[in-house]
Amino acid sequence: MSLTRLLESWPLVRQVREGDRLGVGKAAQSTRSRELRPRIADADHVVQSVCPYCAVGCGQLVYAEAGNVVQIEGDPASPISRGRLCPKGSASLGYATSPLREAKVKYRRPHGTEWEELPLDRAMDMIADRVIATRRETWQAEDDEGNPTRRTLGIANLGGATLDNEENYLIKKLMTALGIVQVENQARI
Amino acid sequence: MGSNMAENHPVGFQWVMEARERGAKVIHVDPRFTRTSAMATQWTGIRAGSDIAFLGGIVHYILEHDRWFHDYVVNYTNAPVIVRDDFRDTEDLDGFFSGWNRDEQAYDPETWQYEGMDMHAAAGGREKGFTAKSGHAAGEGGGGSALPHGEPPDEDPTLEHPRCVFQILKRHFARYTPEFVAKACGCSVEEFVAVADALCDSSGRERTSAIVYSVGWTQHTVGVQYIRTAAIVQLLLGNMGRPGGGILALRGHASIQGSTDIPTLYDILPGYLTMPHVGAYDDLAHYVDANTSRAGWWGNFGSYAVSLLKAYWGEHATKDNDFCFDYLPRIDQDNSIYKCVFDMFDGSVKGFFVVGENPAVGSSHAKLHRLAMAKLDWLVVRDLVDIESSSFWLDGPEIETGELETKQIATEVFFLPAASHVEKDGSFTNTQRLLQWHFKAVDPKDDCRSELWFYFHLGRLIRQKLADAKDERDRPILELTWDYPVAGDIEEPSADAVLAEINGWNAKHEPLSSYKELENDGSTACGCWIYCGVRAEGVNQAARKKPRWEQEHHTALEWAWAWPANRRIIYNRASADPDGKPWSERKRYVWWDEAEEKWTGIDVPDFDEEKRPDYVPPDDAKGPAAIAGNHPFIMQADGRGWLYAPHGLVDGPLPAHFEPDESPFRNPLYGQRANPARQQFDRPENPTNPAGSPAYPFVVTTYRLTEHHTAGGMSRSVPHLAELQPAMFVEVHPELAELRQLEHGGWATIVTTRAAIEARVLVTDRMKPRMVDGRRIHQVGLPYHWGSKGLTTGDAANDLSGLALDPNVHIQEVKAFTCDVRPGRRPRGADLPAFVERVRREAEGGDE
């Protein structure tokens, strides 16, 4: 450490030099405080988003750095929320970066006692096979009186209120084309 | 009422606080004293499940004291319309309306109609056991809310005819006096009168009042009728379609409105089009005809339906093949999740996708859902974290009790990690019908994917595997338009391209700007007619983010996009008087500009822009042209707000007070205790606490906390939130604590005939006991966020509740049922079901 920096680490010197005679201002700042930087300081970009929790629809600003989200805060431009977020909205960073988040497919075979690993493309292939087989086995072309039904009651799909409109659109469209009518979401809870 | 806005929608509540600072009265009527109550100018506590008695009391008060808004009611509602002479009220038949069929346990609504009108076989015929019990006629679909012939044939503008709606209303609510309200709800006469008086004082030409509700109203066996009662109050006071008025449903999921508009629901297609019924339609023309109303915007049903079929099947949908109408699957029963879960339990549902929902915690009778999932062949769960619904087979409560054994469960489970909202583009529709776009900030990691990705690629794979299939069954999936552009290494489909299809295009593939451009000849395609215009001129209107400080009006019309047509208040023609002038200068919103000969204002007028206020439709007019210039409610075939619902509901044209399915009380008004049309499942897996049973003496109500979200999948995994609300608890009053020897901070066991759970005890006088019908009744409060996984764990409140549903919309009654509370922790292992069984045996002998 140079002599200058050694001297500067002594608050009294800083008090005199910076005119902070009572030592209640910047001169009292610890090294840690001085080195603290806003979470967004190194963010490479920010996007406007919407809170994922309730249906008030508060505006969010999402800051990202090198492919990681580093901060989520209220969007002052929103006429709905005027920059404010509730405890859940404020904790959205913890939601997006939760230590419990799963990043890999997990598979449990029939009667299995533990999770196993499975590549995503293999899982997709197996799920597509399950849909095709179950649909074929449970297909109802018509009812007892010969009226066309063109459906299966062997498959159901649940969820949608936490998803995007575009996602719900594809779900309903795909399920309808497959004849899967038991499509439901959180509307009742 | 039925909402804890301050805690569950805190940022929305800032506007309520701002209004209060400017002199508005804020009234909170709720069983619990919450932060909303603390911030209100008046809190009135009532017994859970008694809201219709309270609101009905307000209707009575308005009529008795002549406080209704005469010009509004006479012109804009169906008050003058005369009803058939064979209609009988609950007042005449001791809790039943005319048309009750005891064998089918359902109503035939024919006698509820307007005089001189035939019953419109609403939306797909009335198959036995379907229309009534499925609630299909309940108006979720297009045709359900429409009258066939436009203007009602008989009316009495003096409102004196004994069979006009106004007089029926007066008689129906005659016994809902302040004294009755006090007796049924457990509040004082003075408290009730203060609320009714304040509401009347704050309504009229110069003032408006809004009513806010949440799931506290919907989750009852009479949930829809709760909201009907509020609608009657607001129509009588002239508060609909006006600034500062309305009935505001605050909803708990980011896009729950959107997932109803573009439904992930079984009985409707996008834009509230009716799902076709088995055997009801020979062809498209029949389907369109049955769902088209002569007057109003449902008059264009055919254009909406054909445009949807074109969006789905593109070039394959032609006039010659009925635009592939045959490709739509048919329904003939209740296929809502609760009926479905019994079918799953019985083994007929074999495959199940669960995406962003957690039924093992969040659905009523959660245990039944777990037991049912253990009967599946395969289950796909997509979520950010491993939730109770994905690992019920490994560490669920039934594994501990021995009711399930891991090795015996044959269900094959795929858990696929999902992308969060910051890892994808897309739009949410918020509670005020506003579509707001969120932009992707980062790519999802590893195997995490959006639902857009999952369903697109699942569909692509299925189509690939079936490409050579010759089966008739596979034509709809093979001919489906499914060619969205993808980008990046993971081949993420373009959400904007999907939105473009939702918005729709014309024959030249140019984006449409309004649903008025939709045609029934196949020249337009549109994935959801009410969203048509969201991408007008090829611009994503939902992504508009013009800062609030640059907006012209407080309505902020250039922030995002509201359906329909960017209107922020629907039916806003009612904000002007019949002549088109604002009711008052203070409440100017939308008005007729005589010089310009058009409607104008600070919102997009919800009316034909050039239709004069004095327009009288010619006899042969159809569709929107058949709505008169002074009738604001343009989706209704008569253009009026319905004080009385001649059809659309399966449990009556008027709300009446009924006790919850599980209640300690008899009905103070009628011999009939609970809603006779409520949906019940009489099965051994779904036992019910006997009404009035001393073994389950307390009323229990479930609710949410600020720091958690529904079934906890999005909050128990978040470190800050888990720390802020670290434990499941039960709220009880000090008297109840003393009665049951419960210790603040200690443990209690809550038990019903279905389950027992444990929770930390929170002793608080926020949960006040109520004097009801001369008896003191205790109420118990339970948050429902907890389950067995996450950073904070606890028992699930939804294990306690059963399945008794509103018959219109199949919503469970978790806001008012019964329980017992005992000190200490619940038994463990096999002792737990034995304990529940013991209490159930004690309960036998409760009186009905």
Image (tube, coloured by chain):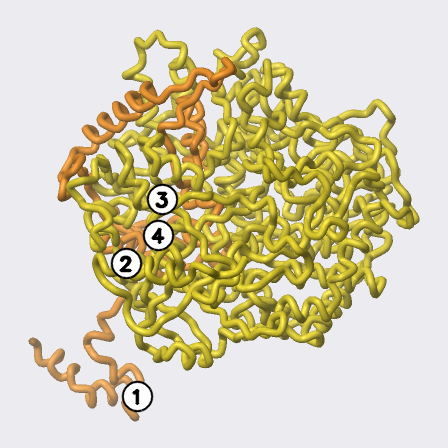
Chain colours: A orange, B yellow
As displayed, is residue B269 above or below residue B21? above
How far apart marks 4 and 3 lie (CA) works out to: 13 Å
The three-letter code of the residue at mark 3 reads: Gly
Q: Secondary structure under badge 3?
A: loop
Callout 1 crowding tier (Cα within 10 Å): few <14, some 14–19, many ≥20: few
Task: Say if labels 4 and 2 share a chain.
Answer: yes
Query: In the drawing, does residue B422 fall left or right of residue B201?
Result: left
Q: Secondary structure under badge 1?
A: loop
Per the rendering, the mark at residue B477 is: none
Q: Residue furthest front?
A: B845
Q: Which residue is mark 2?
A: B834
Task: Say if labels 4 and 1 share a chain.
Answer: no
Q: Give the label, 3 or 2, closer to the camera.
A: 2
Callout 2 crowding tier (Cα within 10 Å): few <14, some 14–19, many ≥20: few
Q: Earlier in the sequence, mark 4 or mark 3?
A: 3
Q: Which residue is mark 4?
A: B361
As displayed, is residue B266 above or below residue B327? below
Residue B398: horizontal and vertical position, in percent?
A: 25, 51
| Residue placed most toward the observer, B535 or A137 | A137
Q: Earlier in the sequence, mark 4 or mark 2?
A: 4
| Residue placed most toward the observer, A34 or B209 | B209
How far apart marks 3 and 2 lie (CA) works out to: 34 Å
Callout 3 crowding tier (Cα within 10 Å): few <14, some 14–19, many ≥20: many
The three-letter code of the residue at mark 4 reads: Val
